[in-house]
Image: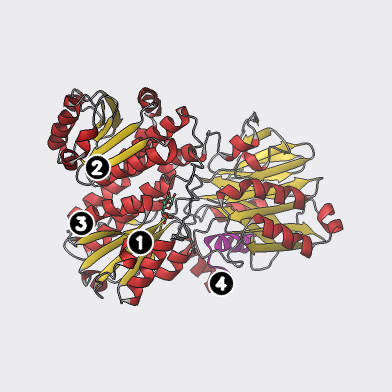
């Protein structure tokens, strides 16, 4: 997920673009850049880091008189998906002639093949991005009409995109196109703006057109001509935006956390995109870069992580043990680094970190590398320290997570762990048939999550009944045990209610002493192995007057009779069930915190990235 803004009109394009990028920084912030057309040339400025740095560079590079008279340009703030966040990889990218430029959000899935074909025709590339390949393709097909060249190029593209392209030959035109990656056009007076969301343009106009998939738009100061890629005009309504900027950044949601919870079907689709091999029943994880022989030589998996990522690792243990037949240990990273752990060269140490910067996780992988283990990362932030130091691993592609309480990163981590275990398993004992079955289960995950989000209204009702609680217990068994820990963590992080997660069997060993009518219990009662024992545990709670909320599989009427309230999740096999269940618990925690007027996105005392011990 990155931010795009483009401007053509009477104002200073530079000012509009920089202002727009600042509003879009929440969508990506590892590098940024812009290009403007003036004096029969394209002028680029790009930099790594925040938009503020770009602004300083722009002011140093271009005198004020130049900045004021330039009326067209496109800009981008990046969240790296292909290639590290470097200056070369920052957008805009230009074609082989330097006369066309492009900014792009999304992923061009067939970029490697396209790059090869273009290289055979003499194209050379300066970045590792899929986006540069696309503008080279447009350049290859360009005969003087940018709109036609963009349409022709998009016919060869597989994947998702939101793009804006410009040509030095047409300093009063921008061509924008969308498939799977949002774009909105702002219709001003003698000016037209394109952006990946309205927050970048509502200080200029509130009249907007949302592009649909497969739309291509020719933008001039006079407005927008919208067609499909076969050059047939399409009509799109002009809408009036009445949000303020703060709400617009959050896509209309009250908090980033809620936005990120609702983004999960898309985030998970991005995580899974192009990674399932439905012929061989395995996962294609290029970053893992290990041969089947190397995978078969692994004797033990050790997962190191902190916080929510640690909980993901605890679910991962079930995946590796079941699918890959590998003994798996999960370690709090600080504990691991200071314990002088036993590490063998046949260990695969998996570091999980959304930010890729957590100090203890980083130190843990340094220790593991020092002792000769194979180290693999699962990170969201491309080019982060852990991603670089592990050297091999799998990115989540979940997009930036702004809310301090981790949500979409957690579910995407589970999806990656499941694919990783599948891949390692297929190099060991797992049959093709079983692999195919797991692939089919993984493919359904985004829909399972959608089904939970559709039940948001029902979850709000339950949250309303429990929002004044002072203590909460979450219990689960098997792979739902770590989900219980994560559910309790979400609640305490953002609502400040004292919440503890326990293995349901541990209740009797202490916590049950605390149960009474004021201590509700969230019981993960999904229809999977262990449910009968869970029901017994629920009865023990109810016998102490503790109100029980059950997370139940859709349609499980029998189990519903054992609980006071229910959150329903779709019926799912035990390997994928933790994901929709976690989403239901995220929503529950969110609504409780909101009802208590808590600052959901920035809970007290917490930081998004813990870079100190
Ligand atoms: C902090 C965050 C948590 C996160 C943990 C680990 O505590 O508030 O949400 O789970 O760090 O962060 P990482 O970036 O390594 O996943």
Residue 314, relative to residue 517: is it above or below? Answer: below
Q: CA distance from mark 3 to mark 1?
A: 28 Å
Q: Position of residue 317 (x, y in %)?
A: 24, 55
Q: Earlier in the sequence, mark 3 or mark 4?
A: 4
Residue sitting nearer the eye, 329 or 41: 329
Q: Which residue bears the numbered disc 1?
A: 334
Q: Position of residue 410 (x, y in %)?
A: 37, 48
| Number of other residues with Cα within 10 Å of mark 2, as a class: few under 14, some 14 to 19, many 20 or more | many
Residue 274, relative to residue 483: is it above or below? Answer: below
Q: Earlier in the sequence, mark 3 or mark 1?
A: 3
Task: Please tell me which residue is depicted at 44% across the width and 56% down the height of the picture.
Answer: 380
Magenta-colored stretch includes residue 310: no
Q: Which residue bears the numbered disc 2?
A: 502
Instruction: Kindly identify which numbered label has been placed on residue 121.
Output: 4
Q: CA distance from mark 1 to mark 4?
A: 52 Å
Q: CA distance from mark 1 to mark 2?
A: 21 Å
Q: Earlier in the sequence, mark 1 or mark 2?
A: 1
Residue 5 visible in the picture? yes
Residue sitting nearer the eye, 443 or 481: 481
Q: Earlier in the sequence, mark 3 or mark 2?
A: 3
Q: Nearer the viewer, mark 2 or mark 4?
A: 2
| Number of other residues with Cα within 10 Å of mark 1, as a class: few under 14, some 14 to 19, many 20 or more | some
| Number of other residues with Cα within 10 Å of mark 4, as a class: few under 14, some 14 to 19, many 20 or more | few
- Which portion, as a residue range, is magenta? 124-144
Q: CA distance from mark 2 to mark 4?
A: 61 Å
Q: CA distance from mark 3 to mark 4?
A: 45 Å
Q: Which residue bears the numbered disc 3?
A: 323
Q: Secondary structure at mark 4?
A: loop
Q: CA distance from mark 3 to mark 2?
A: 25 Å
Residue sitting nearer the eye, 116 or 478: 478
């Amino acid at each position: 997920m990155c931010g795009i803004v483009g401007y053509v009109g009477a104002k200073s394009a530079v000012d509009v673009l920089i202002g727009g990028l600042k509003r879009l920084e929440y969508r990506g912030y590892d590098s940024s850049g812009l290009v403007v057309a003036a004096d029969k040339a394209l002028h680029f400025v790009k930099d790594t880091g925040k938009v503020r740095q770009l602004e300083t560079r722009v002011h140093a590079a271009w005198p004020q008189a130049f900045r004021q008279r330039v009326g067209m340009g496109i800009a981008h703030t990046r969240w790296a998906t292909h290639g590290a966040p470097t200056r070369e990889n920052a957008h805009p990218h230009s074609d082989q002639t330097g006369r066309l430029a492009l900014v792009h959000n999304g992923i061009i899935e067939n970029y490697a093949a396209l790059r090869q074909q273009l290289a055979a025709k003499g194209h050379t590339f300066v970045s590792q991005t899929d986006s540069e390949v696309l503008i080279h393709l447009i350049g290859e097909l360009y005969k003087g009409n940018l709109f036609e060249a963009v349409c022709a190029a998009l016919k060869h593209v597989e994947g998702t995109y939101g793009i804006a392209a410009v040509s030095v030959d047409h300093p009063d035109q921008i061509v924008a196109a969308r498939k799977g990656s949002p774009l909105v056009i702002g219709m001003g007076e003698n000016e037209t703006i394109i952006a990946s969301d309205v927050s970048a343009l509502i200080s200029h106009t509130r009249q907007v057109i949302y592009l649909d998939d497969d739309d291509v738009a020719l933008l001039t100061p006079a407005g927008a001509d919208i067609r499909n890629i076969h050059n047939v005009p399409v009509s799109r309504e002009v809408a009036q935006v009445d949000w303020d900027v703060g709400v617009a950044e959050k896509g209309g949601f009250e908090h980033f956390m809620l936005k990120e919870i609702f983004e999960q079907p898309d985030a998970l689709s991005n995580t899974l995109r192009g990674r399932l091999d439905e012929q061989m029943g395995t996962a294609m994880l290029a970053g893992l870069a290990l041969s089947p022989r190397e995978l078969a030589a692994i004797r033990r998996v050790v997962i190191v992580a902190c916080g929510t990522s640690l909980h993901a690792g605890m679910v991962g243990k079930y995946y590796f043990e079941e699918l890959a037949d590998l003994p798996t240990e999960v370690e709090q990273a600080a504990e691991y680094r200071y314990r002088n752990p036993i590490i063998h060269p046949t260990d695969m140490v998996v570091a999980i970190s959304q930010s890729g910067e957590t100090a203890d996780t980083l130190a843990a992988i340094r220790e593991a590398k020092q002792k000769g283990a194979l180290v693999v990362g699962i990170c969201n932030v491309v080019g982060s320290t852990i991603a670089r130091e592990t050297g091999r691993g799998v990115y989540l592609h979940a997009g930036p997570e702004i809310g301090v309480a981790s949500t979409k990163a957690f579910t995407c981590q589970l999806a990656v762990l499941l694919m990783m275990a599948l891949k390692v398993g297929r190099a060991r004992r797992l049959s093709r048939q079983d692999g195919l079955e797991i692939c089919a289960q993984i493919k359904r995950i985004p829909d399972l999550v959608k089904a939970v989000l559709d039940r948001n209204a029902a979850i709000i009702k339950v949250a309303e009944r429990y929002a004044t609680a002072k203590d909460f217990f979450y219990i689960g068994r098997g792979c739902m045990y770590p989900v219980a820990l994560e559910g309790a963590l979400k609640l305490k992080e953002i609502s400040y209610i004292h919440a503890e997660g326990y293995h349901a069997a541990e209740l009797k060993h202490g916590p049950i002493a605390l149960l009474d009518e004021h201590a509700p219990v969230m019981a993960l009662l999904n229809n999977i192995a262990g449910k009968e024992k869970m029901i017994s545990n629920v009865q023990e709670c109810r016998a102490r007057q503790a109100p029980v909320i059950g997370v139940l599989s859709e349609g499980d009427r029998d189990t519903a009779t054992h609980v006071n309230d229910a959150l329903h999740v779709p019926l799912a096999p035990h390997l994928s069930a933790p994901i929709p269940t976690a989403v239901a618990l995220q929503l529950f925690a969110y609504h409780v915190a909101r009802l208590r007027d808590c600052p959901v996105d920035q809970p007290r005392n917490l930081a998004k990235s813990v870079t100190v011990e």
